[in-house]
Amino acid sequence: MRQPVNLAAKLGLFSEHWSPKIVGAFNGHDLMVVKVMGAFNWHSHPDTDDFFMVLSGRLTIQMRDGDVVLEPGEVYVVPKGVEHCPKADVETHLLLIEPAGTPNTGDAATAATKTEI
């Protein structure tokens, strides 16, 4: 029988930023945790929405028509095709859910490698 996944314990296993770690899967989707600080890069996902849940810290999702600020416990979904740039002024921990194999930049050539922990 599988055991529950403790997200805080998984986040304690690594220190690098912007390097998503797969902690589980369901219905063809990866469940990932990631530590972020500073700005990522402007990008979009032409075929998938982009799900963000803040576990700790504070995340600003910059978009061309205005920013969305997320506090712990808040969720936001960037619709597919919308250009955005996540950024955090303090280290922020996120839960991400996306279809397995989706590059985090929307482009496999520039995406960070996802590893399972």
Image (cartoon, rainbow, N blue to C red):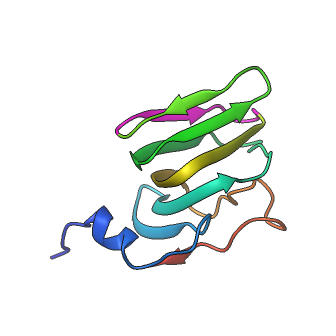
Residue at (20% x, 66% y) in the render: 4
Please state, as top left, top right, bottom left or bottom right, where the C terminus lies in the image. bottom left
Residue 99 included in the magenta stretch of the image: no
Predominant SS along the magenta part: loop
Toward the viewer: 56 or 89? 89
Residue 76 included in the magenta stretch of the image: yes
Q: Choose top left, top right, bottom left or bottom right for residue 36.
A: bottom right
Q: Is residue 85 above or below residue 3?
A: above
From the top left corner, tell me how far across and down residue 45 is, in percent.
Answer: 74, 45
Q: Is residue 1 above or below residue 75?
A: below
From the top left corner, tell me how far across and down residue 93 is, in percent.
Answer: 45, 55
Tell me the magenta residue range: 73-82
From the top left corner, tell me how far across and down residue 40 is, in percent.
Answer: 72, 53
- Return the residue found at the far left: 1
- Residue 22 in the figure: left or right of residue 87: left
Total residue callouts: 0
